[in-house]
């Protein structure tokens, strides 16, 4: 129970920073959708390029965040050497990436459709390189339970980015999309300097660790490096497939959509509306930041399976509650984006369902990480990615970005079901399915009522009625969970 309380506390810290940060980032959405009209397609360029950035970041980090937690918590391993070896791996990959980008910029920019704007690619390459380097120090903060510093740095980046964006796009009146990427690079670069104390502390602690045990000091242990690579490469495949499930639709859309002149405009609308649905990604991310270090630390405890089951239950309960809140207050939330983008609001519930499935899949994924069979994750995510590609390629030409939303449901749903079915054979956990289905069915029923009220009431009355329905969901939670909460 103490670990569950620690999870809730850390999730609250990570969650508040993520919620506040995402809220502050939302301030950029109306700014961008106002500065960059849907018809112009510039916000489509932002959506498209950040999809490539997300994929590249997964490749460069090479699964080292999870691998770092696994080996730092293993008995007999030197956690300081695990840290420095992780940095070495990511740093080497990042240096090679930058060499390729700068060496073949003409060819690369032409292939992805930005031959006339190579500067976009160069700027974003530098951004993703710095993000990759920062990934391990951020993981180190989570490992050391330094949630406050972690959250503070995340918020500092966002506040600097927002401030500079307001200065450039509002005060100076600049409308060049190049500055979106340039400001990101400036802010990311500044955050890097705040990790200098962690690097110094780790270097000193590593030397002291080695002196106390009379072992040679090594920044990189080749034996450890091989073992970490063996553990991490399936996670890399898993990560690539997972991020493709989130971003491939945005990369495929300009290539598959039949009308090339309006492809970026349609993608801009989709990208703007997806921002509203990203509250699910925010919740999942906050949960992951807190949950991942605890899972590996708790893997030796006798009650670990009960803990994993309880964590899954409360995750589902909370994400379904968030789903109802977003739907219930859509008349307010839709104002985040400019009116010209709101024709795509219909895809928000679909994208949120996909994000809930992704979160459940993340919770299910720990069984193969704990038994060091990460190859299963690669197969599951790969299958989900293939399903997403199929849905997008077949249906985008006819249904535009609505197909992208349903492709996410198909992709995450496939990975989720495969992980559950095989996981129950390899590492069975009682996930209290009847209780979970009660919440799912209740949420579905309340959503149907909310959808019906959309056409019957004014926005203000609709939100009032939806508030009553959300309270009904909370009442169901209190009735069903009160005995467990009291324990």
Image (cartoon, rainbow, N blue to C red):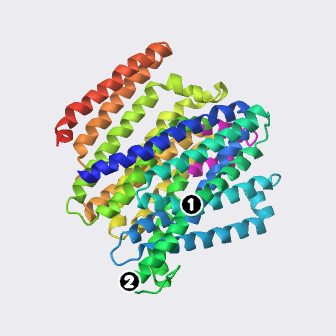
Residue 381, x across and y down, in percent: 46, 59
The answer to whether residue 34 of the structure is visible from this angle is: yes
Q: Please say if 218 is above or below 446.
A: below
Q: Does label 1 or label 2 sit earlier along the sequence?
A: 1
Check disc 2 and report its element: helix, strand or loop.
helix
**Residue at the extreme right:** 116
Number of residue marks: 2
Q: Please say if 309 is above or below 345.
A: below
Tell which of 207 and 104 is nearer to you: 207
- For label 2, the residue is 213
Tell which of 121 and 1 is nearer to you: 1
Q: Please say if 232 is above or below 388.
A: below
Residue 110, x across and y down, in percent: 78, 58
Q: Residues within 10 Å of mark 1 (few under 14, many from 20)?
A: some
Which residue is depicted at the point 73% across and 65% down? 101
> Looking at the magenta stretch, what is its main secondary structure?
helix
Whole-number angstrom distance, CA of label 1 to CA of label 2: 27 Å
Which residue is depicted at the point 62% across and 73% down? 92
The answer to whether residue 382 of the structure is visible from this angle is: no
- Does residue 268 show up magenta in the picture? yes
Residue 318, x across and y down, in percent: 35, 39
- Does residue 47 appear to the left or right of 13 in the view shown? right
Which residue is depicted at the point 64% across and 30% down? 341
Look at the image and tell me in which quarter the C terminus lies.
top left
């Amino acid at each position: 129970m103490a670990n569950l309380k620690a999870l809730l506390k850390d999730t609250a810290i990570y969650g508040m920073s993520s919620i506040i940060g995402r809220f502050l980032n939302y301030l950029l959405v109306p700014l961008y959708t106002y500065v960059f009209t849907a018809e112009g397609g510039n916000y489509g360029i932002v959506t498209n390029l950040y999809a490539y950035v997300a994929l590249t970041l997964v490749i460069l980090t090479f699964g080292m965040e999870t691998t770092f937690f696994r080996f730092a918590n293993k008995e007999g391993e030197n956690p300081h050497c695990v840290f420095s070896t992780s940095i070495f791996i990511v740093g080497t990959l990042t240096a090679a990436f930058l060499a390729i980008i700068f060496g073949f910029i003409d060819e690369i920019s032409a292939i992805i459709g930005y031959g006339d704007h190579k500067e976009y690619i160069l700027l974003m390459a530098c951004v993703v390189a710095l993000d990759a380097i920062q990934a391990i120090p951020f993981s180190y903060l989570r490992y050391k339970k330094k949630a406050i510093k972690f959250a503070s740095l995340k918020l500092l980046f966002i506040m600097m980015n927002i401030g500079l964006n307001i200065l450039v796009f509002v005060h100076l009146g600049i409308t060049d999309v190049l500055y979106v990427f340039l400001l990101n690079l400036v802010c990311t670069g500044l955050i890097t300097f705040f990790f200098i104390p962690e690097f110094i502390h780790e270097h000193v602690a590593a030397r002291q660790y080695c002196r106390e045990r009379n072992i040679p000091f090594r920044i990189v242990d080749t034996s450890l490096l091989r073992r970490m690579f063996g553990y991490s490469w399936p996670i890399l495949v898993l990560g690539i497939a997972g991020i493709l499930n989130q971003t491939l639709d945005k990369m495929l859309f300009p290539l598959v959509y039949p009308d090339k002149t309006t492809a970026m405009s349609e993608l801009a609308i989709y990208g703007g509306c997806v921002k509203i649905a990203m509250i699910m990604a925010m919740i999942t991310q906050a949960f992951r930041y807190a949950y991942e270090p605890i899972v590996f630390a708790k893997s030796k405890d006798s009650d670990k399976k009960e803990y994993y089951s309880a964590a899954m239950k409360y995750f589902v309960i909370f994400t379904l509650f968030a789903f109802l809140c977003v739907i219930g207050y859509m008349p307010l939330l839709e104002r985040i984006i400019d009116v010209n983008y709101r024709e795509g609001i219909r895809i928000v519930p679909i994208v949120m369902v996909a994000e809930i499935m992704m979160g459940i899949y993340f919770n299910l994924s720990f069984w193969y990480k704990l038994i060091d069979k990460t190859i299963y994750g690669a197969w599951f995510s790969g299958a989900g990615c293939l399903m997403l590609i199929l849905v997008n390629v077949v249906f985008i030409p006819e249904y535009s970005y609505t197909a992208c939303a349903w492709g996410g449901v198909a992709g995450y749903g496939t990975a989720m079901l495969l992980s559950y079915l095989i996981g129950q054979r390899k590492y069975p956990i009682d996930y209290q399915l009847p209780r979970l289905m009660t919440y799912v069915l209740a949420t579905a029923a309340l959503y149907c009522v909310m959808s019906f009220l959309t056409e019957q009431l004014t926005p203000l009355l609709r939100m009032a009625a939806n508030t009553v329905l959300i309270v009904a969901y909370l009442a169901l939670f209190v009735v069903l969970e009160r005995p467990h909460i009291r324990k």
